[in-house]
Amino acid sequence: MKIASFKAGSVASYGIVTDSGVIDAGRRLKDLPTLKALLTKGSVDALKVLTGERADYALKDIELLPTVPDPDKIFCIGVNYATHLAESGHPTPPHPMIFTRFANSQVGGGQPMIRPLESERFDYEGEMAVIVGRRGRRISRENALKHVAGYACYNDGSIRDWQRHTSQFAPGKNFAGTGGFGPWMVTTDEISDISKQTIATRLNGVEVQAAPISDLVFDVPALIAYCSTFTELVPGDVIVTGTTGGVGAYRTPPLWMKDGDVVEVEISGIGVLRNPVKDEVAASATRAA
């Protein structure tokens, strides 16, 4: 199934994406009002009984939210493709390089990714997100995929100069509205082996990144095993697995996203995450000053 979080008017919900539109599961399953609640209860199968129902909304009539709007944790994995290691000059790390994102740094499919006032160095990073569906601590590699609910596209938009203020990445990765997440999650029963899929990023229709998922330095089982060693993974947690070579920062000249651009991340078997790029508006940015 494809499962999306969305807003219809002022009401947030989630549901099943079909060829004819979106079936509103949040309205029907009142005790499971959000995707995170559904995952926490281990009730994804409850959606299967809704798949034959009539769609409530056309995709064009809803606002897509980040696939999991309220995750407990978002782990992002740095330099996790060999091509990105090569272009950045990093040696192959002995362990995954991890930084975190905040939920309010994310937007859904079709929503603007925001270039902040403080920088013009807004970079794209096409990635695959893993959505945790089952609680676990010290999960073995052999059992890791049993804890995955599904996969989604992700654009780990980076404010490069702020990212490089120090060796810690978090400031450049957490400006509001800089990360795209969606447009939906595809459940694991639809993708038997995620490593056989491919990922590509396009900026204004021009392909700027492309790789097979199998090129990950640390694959999905390795990341789940590692992250669950130092913290308990819970349903709705997100692991963003890293980007491949071709990012704007290492091009000559550098290629930054700007107001009016459209950026797309496509993963075979999942779909296309498409976001326009907008400049932050000074008036709203200074509202609380």
Image: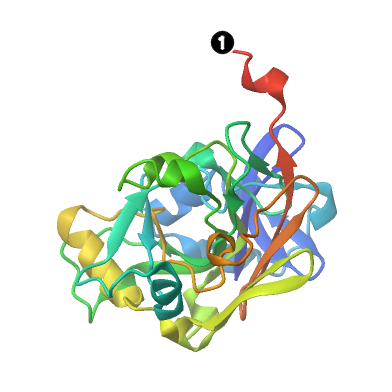
Between residue 175 and residue 145, name the one nearer to us. Answer: 175
Q: Quadrant of residue 217?
A: bottom left
Reply above or below: 253 against 6. below
Please tell me which residue is depicted at 63% across the width and 14% down the height of the picture: 287
Residue 201's x, y, as percent? 64, 70
Residue 4's x, y, as percent? 62, 56
| Quadrant housing the C terminus | top right
Please tell me which residue is depicted at 72% across the width and 48% down the height of the picture: 258
Label 1: state its secondary structure. Answer: loop
Is residue 195 visible in the rendered image? The answer is yes
Residue 162's x, y, as percent? 46, 41
| Quadrant housing the N terminus | bottom right
**Can you identify the residue that label 1 sits on?**
289
Along the horizontal axis of the image, is 28 left or right of 92? right
Is residue 137 visible in the rendered image? The answer is no
Please tell me which residue is depicted at 81% across the width and 48% down the height of the picture: 260
Reply above or below: 165 against 289. below
Reply above or below: 274 against 146. above
Residue 185's x, y, as percent? 56, 64
Farthest top residue?
289
